[in-house]
Image: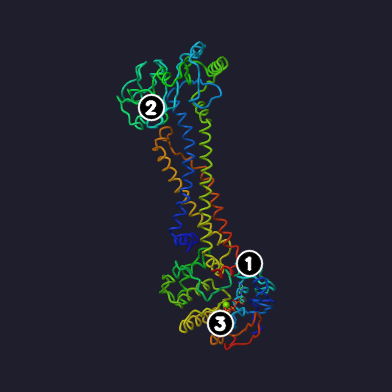
């Protein structure tokens, strides 16, 4: 485990809102290694989403720094490039565009990509998430689980090294939640993609190699989960 | 899914709003195009009209630009004729009046010179008999007044018999009534006065000789001698026309700015509505340049269609203008490519600004903030 290379490092991250009145994160340190799976757990309001936003550059910390493979990431442009090349994100809300088909929603992640085999890449990822049949439906014509699979395909079509998933199954019934979760773990294993899942579901957390618990904006516990380290 | 296709699909999510914005811009550009064509039309119609009436030189009083205010003594005619090189002198008096019904009529009194009357083309009927209360009408003014040959119309507190319809081709002259000079002088209480003299120089004079004669006339008789293009330039310097042109220009600018604001408002609203979406695009790897391009393409799409529509509206409005009697009687409209240059030169940069600001707004937020936006 120790010999795996560092992927993302959070160093002494603090973030507050409302001019310091709400302290969402205080002095968080966390190191993610390549290909590892981590569950981020903790009470509602403990700061999990905030941490994920900072770790993916969607938000800025007040203090501390974020390292990608040992180098500090700064600036909007650098973060956009990193999300473009190496980081995928899925949210509890699927954030699909209602007027675009499932396929088109996935294609959005490849807009501006120089030519190549775009259609083939989209087809392959749609097949992997099991949506080939439903690719041309609008989100309104898909179930919640299917929508989240579209969002997952959109996050994965560029084959990121790291996937952040903020309560990806939070809006799904247990059958759909299991399907989406096992899909994520399959891809995590197949592609050796690092995976960080925020979840309230203990059984989902136990499938990860590591479980990090956040309490009041601090890491209070960091221990191995049920999954075997690869 | 290309950026352009995505931009188009975004606009089509609110087709009515997109269409209304395009229409708003089209109306703005169209207004500007039509108004600028109007200003140009006034000038050109004057030049055309005067050229059609006589291809000679026009003698007018100094320092007067309003043609109805021009007064020259009838005795000046003899002085002009006496100058060497002047072959022919005729005079005319212009009076603007109205019928009892309130229709405006421009009346030209034409001096009793056979060569002058020979230049008045006849469509039907005949020329007035000198000394009688008879009048010829341009076809447009005849139509406006609803008068035919044989009808009697009352002008300047006097009754005139319509004896002919002129066959002038320019809008200016088609709206003019023509009668003998003496009759008009009496009717308008301007005895022994004329507005302008037309002179023709001896044939075969060189440019330099012509210039010298013109200079001599101007010096000896304290008048201005102009050719037809010059007279049109001077008359367009008339205060009313200058004001009209200035107003046209001002309204054009306001219209185009309003069009651009319209685009700005629409895009700003649409960017605001899509704040979360833009946050999502950032989350799936879009950089700022791509987001800005998206909004700019959306703006460009509306702007280009608006401008294209504006050109059509402008041309349509120009032809509509011509059919309004008060305008069409005086001005002919032929929209030209050059009328489009100015409004478009204004509109395009304004539309770009109108799109750039919302685009900048779209990327001025942290993605996390955008995603949390409600
Ligand atoms: N933009 C914001 N403005 C003000 N307070 C915020 C903002 N974002 C987060 N917070 C606060 O920061 C704290 C942490 O929020 P965060 O969303 O990270 O919680 P969480 O652990 O993800 O909770 P949940 O499990 O309910 O999603 C909360 O107290 C929240 O109210
Ligand atoms: Mg959360």
Mark 1–mark 3 distance (CA, rounded to whole Å): 28 Å
Q: Can you say whether B307 is above or below B233 in the image?
A: below
Subunit that carries the residue with mark 3: A
Residue tagged by mark 1? Answer: A78
Colour mode? rainbow
Q: Which mark is residue A199?
A: 3
Subunit that carries the residue with mark 1: A
Classify mark 2: helix, strand or loop: loop
Answer yes or no: are tags 1 and 2 on the same subunit. Answer: no
Classify mark 3: helix, strand or loop: loop
Mark 2–mark 3 distance (CA, rounded to whole Å): 89 Å
The mark lying in front, picked from 2 and 3, is 2
Residue ID at (53%, 52%): B261
In this view, the residue in front, B284 or A227, is B284
Using the rendered view, name the quadrant where residue A3 is placed: bottom right
In this view, the residue in front, A139 or B93, is B93
Q: Which mark is residue B71?
A: none
Classify mark 1: helix, strand or loop: helix
Mark 1–mark 2 distance (CA, rounded to whole Å): 74 Å
Residue tagged by mark 2? Answer: B168
Mark 3, other Cα within 10 Å: few <14 / some 14–19 / many ≥20: many
Q: Give x and y (percent) for residue B329.
A: 40, 33
Report whether A145 appears left or right of B118. Answer: right
Q: Give x and y (percent) for residue A99.
A: 44, 66
In this view, the residue in front, A196 or B317, is B317
């Amino acid at each position: 485990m120790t010999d795996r290379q560092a992927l993302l490092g959070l160093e002494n991250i603090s973030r507050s809102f409302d001019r310091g009145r709400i302290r969402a994160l205080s002095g968080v340190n966390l190191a993610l290694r390549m290909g590892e799976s981590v569950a981020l757990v903790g009470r509602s309001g403990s700061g999990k989403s905030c941490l994920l936003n900072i770790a993916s550059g969607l938000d800025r910390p007040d203090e501390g720094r974020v390292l990608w493979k040992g180098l500090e990431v700064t600036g909007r442009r650098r973060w956009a490039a990193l999300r473009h090349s190496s980081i995928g994100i899925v949210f509890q809300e699927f954030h699909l565009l209602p007027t675009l088909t499932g396929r088109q929603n996935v294609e959005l992640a490849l807009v501006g990509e120089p030519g190549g085999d775009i259609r083939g890449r989209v087809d392959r990822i749609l097949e992997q998430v099991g949506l080939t049949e439903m690719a041309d439906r609008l989100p309104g014509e898909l179930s919640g689980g299917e929508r989240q699979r579209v969002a997952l395909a959109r996050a994965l079509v560029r084959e990121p090294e790291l996937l952040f998933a903020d309560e990806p199954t939070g809006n799904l019934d247990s059958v759909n939640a299991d399907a989406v979760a096992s899909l994520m773990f399959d891809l995590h294993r197949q592609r050796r993609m690092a995976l960080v899942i925020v979840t309230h579901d203990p059984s989902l957390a136990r499938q990860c190699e590591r479980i990090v618990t956040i309490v009041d904006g601090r890491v209070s516990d960091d221990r191995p989960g049920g999954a075997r380290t690869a | 899914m290309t950026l352009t296709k995505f931009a188009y699909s975004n606009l089509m999510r609110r087709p009515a709003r997109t269409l209304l914005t395009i229409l708003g811009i089209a109306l703005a550009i169209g207004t500007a195009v039509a108004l600028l064509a109007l200003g140009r039309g006034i000038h050109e119609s004057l030049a055309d009209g005067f050229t059609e009436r006589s291809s000679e030189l026009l003698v007018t009083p100094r320092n007067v630009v309003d043609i109805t205010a021009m007064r020259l003594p009838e005795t000046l005619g003899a002085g002009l004729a006496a100058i060497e090189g002047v072959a022919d002198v005729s005079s005319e008096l212009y009076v603007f009046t109205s019928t009892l019904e309130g229709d405006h009529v421009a009346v030209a009194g034409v001096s009793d010179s056979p060569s002058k009357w020979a230049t008045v083309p006849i469509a039907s009927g005949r020329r007035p008999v000198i000394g009688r209360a008879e009048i010829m009408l341009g076809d447009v003014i005849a139509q406006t007044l609803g008068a035919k040959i044989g009808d009697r119309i009352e002008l300047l507190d006097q009754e005139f018999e319509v004896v002919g319809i002129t066959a002038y081709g320019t809008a200016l002259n088609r709206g003019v009534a023509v009668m003998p000079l003496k009759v008009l002088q009496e009717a308008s209480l301007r005895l022994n006065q004329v507005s302008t003299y037309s002179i023709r120089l001896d044939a075969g004079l060189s440019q330099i000789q012509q210039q010298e004669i013109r200079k001599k006339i101007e010096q000896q008789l304290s008048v201005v001698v102009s050719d037809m293009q010059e007279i049109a330039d001077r008359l367009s310097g008339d205060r009313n026309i200058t004001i009209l042109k200035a107003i046209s220009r001002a309204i054009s600018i306001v219209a185009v700015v309003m069009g651009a604001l319209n685009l700005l408002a629409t895009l700003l609203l649409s960017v605001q509505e899509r704040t979360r979406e833009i946050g999502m695009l950032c989350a799936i790897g879009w950089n700022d340049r791509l987001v800005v391009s998206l909004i700019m393409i959306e703006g460009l799409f509306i702007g280009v269609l608006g401008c294209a529509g504006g050109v059509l509206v402008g041309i349509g409005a120009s032809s509509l203008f011509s059919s309004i009697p008060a305008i069409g009687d005086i001005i002919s409209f032929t929209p030209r490519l050059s009328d489009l240059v100015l409004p478009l030169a204004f509109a395009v940069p304004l539309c770009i600004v109108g799109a750039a600001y919302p685009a900048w707004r779209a990327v001025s937020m942290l993605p996390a903030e955008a995603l949390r936006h409600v």
